[in-house]
Image (cartoon, rainbow, N blue to C red):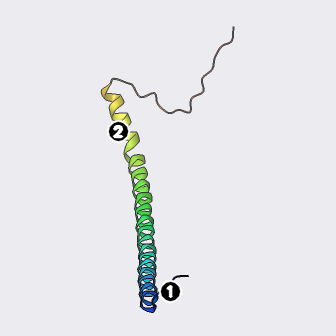
């Protein structure tokens, strides 16, 4: 076996130690960023659900009146309540 100088072993250990520290620092920073991204994603999803709920409520409030107004503009006539019974004569 070739003889390796002690200073090369010490230098190699230091380099490996620095690389290990840099890797661990990178891992912890990545985990921190992932936690922040997940928190922002939860906030976004909550805002999206809230928006969808408000949009549904808004659509329910204006929907029938808007449809009725457009139907009157097109010349449709109000048929009255839908509780009437339709009877069909069989031949």
Give the Cα distance between marks 2 and 1: 91 Å
The picture places residue 84, in percent across and down from the top left corner, at 56, 29
**Residue 3: numbered disc:** 1
Compared to 40, does 52 lie above or below? above
**Residue 66: numbered disc:** 2
The picture places residue 86, in percent across and down from the top left corner, at 60, 23
- Viewer-proximal residue, 58 or 14? 14
* SS at circle 1: loop
Compared to 31, does 7 lie above or below? below
**Residue 32: numbered disc:** none
Q: What residue do we see at 41% from left, 68% from top? A: 37
Q: What residue do we see at 39% from left, 42% from top? A: 63
Which quadrant: the C terminus?
top right
Looking at marks 2 and 1 on the same chain, the residue that comes earlier in the sequence is marked by: 1
Compared to 25, does 55 lie above or below? above
* Callout in the foreground (2, 1): 1
The picture places residue 15, in percent across and down from the top left corner, at 41, 83
Which quadrant: the N terminus?
bottom right
Q: What residue do we see at 45% from left, 82% from top? A: 16
Q: What residue do we see at 41% from left, 72% from top? A: 33
The picture places residue 57, in percent across and down from the top left corner, at 42, 52
**10 Å neighbourhood of mark 1: few (<14), some, or many (≥20)?**
few
């Amino acid at each position: 076996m070739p003889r390796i100088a002690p200073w090369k072993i010490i230098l190699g250990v230091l380099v490996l130690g620095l690389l290990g520290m840099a890797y661990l620092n990178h891992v912890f920073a990545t985990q921190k960023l992932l936690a922040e991204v997940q928190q922002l994603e939860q906030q976004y999803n909550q805002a999206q659900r809230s928006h969808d709920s408000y949009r549904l409520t808004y659509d329910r409030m204006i929907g029938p009146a808007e449809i009725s107004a457009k139907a009157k503009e097109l010349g449709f006539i109000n048929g009255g309540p839908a509780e009437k019974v339709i009877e069909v004569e069989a031949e």
